[in-house]
Amino acid sequence: MERLILGMTAGALTTISFVPQVIKIYKMKDAKELSLATFAIFSCGVFLWLVYGIIIREWPVILANGITFALICLIIAMKIKYSGTK
C-alpha cells in the first residue's frame, strides 16, 4: 500500500508540474522560448513510460504518464500554433 501511495504521489506531482506551463502558454499565446526538440524528445520518453506501465500493469505509472503525455502533446501543439505570435 505504501508503494502505491508513493507512486501516485510522485506521479501526481510530476504531472501537475506541467499545468502552469500549459496555462501560461494559453494565456500569453506565446511559446517561442520553449524548445520544440526538448518537448518532442521528452514526449517520446513519457510515451515509452506509459507503454511500460501498461505492460507491467502499474496504475500509478499508467495514469501519471498518460496524463503527462496528454499535457506535453498540448504544449507541443500550442508551441507550433503560437511560435510565430506574441
Image (cartoon, rainbow, N blue to C red):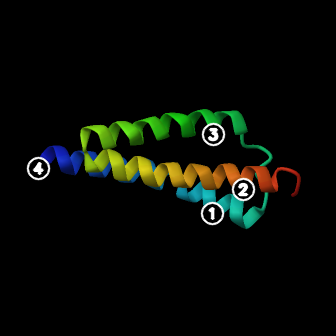
Residue 25: quarter of image: bottom right
Mark on residue 23? 1
Which dot, 1 or 3, sits closer to the camera?
Answer: 3
Q: Is residue 35 left or right of residue 4?
A: right
In primary-sequence order, the first of circles 3 and 4 is 4
In primary-sequence order, the first of circles 1 and 2 is 1
In primary-sequence order, the first of circles 4 and 1 is 4
Label 4 sits on a secondary structure element that is: loop
Mark on residue 1? 4
Residue marked by disc 2: 78
In primary-sequence order, the first of circles 2 and 4 is 4
Which dot, 1 or 2, sits closer to the camera?
Answer: 2
Q: Where is residue 76 shown, x and y percent of the image?
A: 67, 48
- The answer to whether residue 35 is above or below residue 65 is above
Residue sitting farthest toward the bottom: 27
In primary-sequence order, the first of circles 1 and 3 is 1
Q: Where is residue 57 shown, x and y percent of the image?
A: 25, 44
Residue name at image x 76 percent, y 62 percent? 28
Residue marked by disc 3: 39
Q: How far separated are the C-alphas under marks 4 and 1?
A: 33 Å
Question: The disc labelled 3 sits on which kind of residue?
Answer: Phe
Residue 41: quarter of image: top right
Q: Where is residue 14 shown, x and y percent of the image?
A: 43, 47
* 49 vs 6, nearest the viewer: 49
Label 3 sits on a secondary structure element that is: helix
Residue sitting farthest toward the left: 1
- Crowd around label 1: few <14 · some 14–19 · many ≥20 (10 Å): few
Residue name at image x 50 percent, y 34 percent? 45
Which dot, 4 or 1, sits closer to the camera?
Answer: 4
Question: The disc labelled 4 sits on which kind of residue?
Answer: Met
